[in-house]
Amino acid sequence: MQFSGLELILHAGIIVKCVLSVLLLFSVISWAIMFYKWRFFSVVRAENDKFIRFFRLEKSLSGLFKMTKSLEISTHAKVFRSVYSDKYLTDSDDVRRALKRYVDVENSRLENYLSFLATTGSTTPFIGLFGTVWGIMDAFRGIGTAGSAALSVVAPGIAEALITTAVGLLAAIPAVIGYNYFLSRCRQLIMETEDFSEDLYGFFVKKPSGGGSNS
């Protein structure tokens, strides 16, 4: 008797089905995160480039602040607005500490959800392996009940069990690739934001009268 993959899943035990459901959930969330991060990083890059153009053209803090109100995702613009709006900066040391603090906040925002991709890549193969082990145990119990070790008795249960390992790998491989890709883009954006914060520091120190005000 031959079974398709779908039929094997439908005939699987409750534990195997639960494992497959967990793996499917990990996979769906991982793909959602990857699509989100792709869009997010693309917008961040575009808005950062736009902010740099504003920065090179605008000579006043208040004018630059007004220009950046439309840039809601740009890390450069958000760091600038945070420092500009900070009313407790009294000297250049305060400005540098504020820049460091706000850059760290933006760096954390860039890294959001990447840890889930890493978790998916490292855990789903083992979750799938657990389902396989449990399924094989069920298959051996079935052998005992049937009183026969014929291939026709053993094969469906073993095939059913191995599906969870395959699904675990299908969930893990894209997550690992996505994690490495987006981590690389994240690090590049972090480096660019940290480098640009030095330009912002000089800009704020040279124009201290504009800081701490939203006018």
Image: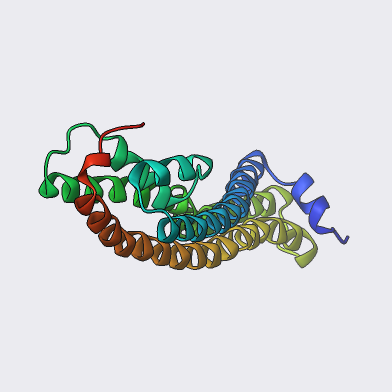
Where's residue 167, x and y in %?
65, 58
Q: Considering only vertical position in the picture, is 156 above or below 67?
A: below
143 with respect to 65 (left or right): right
Instruction: Assign the C terminus to one quadrant of the image.
Output: top left
Frontmost residue, 120 versus 205: 205
213 with respect to 168 (left or right): left
Where's residue 173, x and y in %?
57, 66
Instruction: Assign the N terminus to one quadrant of the image.
Output: bottom right
At a point 60% along the width and 58% down the height, the residue shown is: 171
Frontmost residue, 28 versus 122: 28
87 with respect to 56 (left or right): left
Where's residue 182, x and y in %?
50, 62
At a point 55% along the width and 52% down the height, the residue shown is: 40
Frontmost residue, 176 versus 42: 42
Farthest residue, direction front: 59
**Residue 178, quarter of picture:** bottom right
117 with respect to 149 (left or right): left
Q: Considering only vertical position in the picture, is 61 above or below 156?
A: above
What is the total number of numbered labels drawn onto the structure image? 0
Where's residue 190, x and y in %?
37, 60
Farthest residue, direction right: 1
Frontmost residue, 68 versus 7: 68
At a point 35% along the width and 32% down the height, the residue shown is: 214
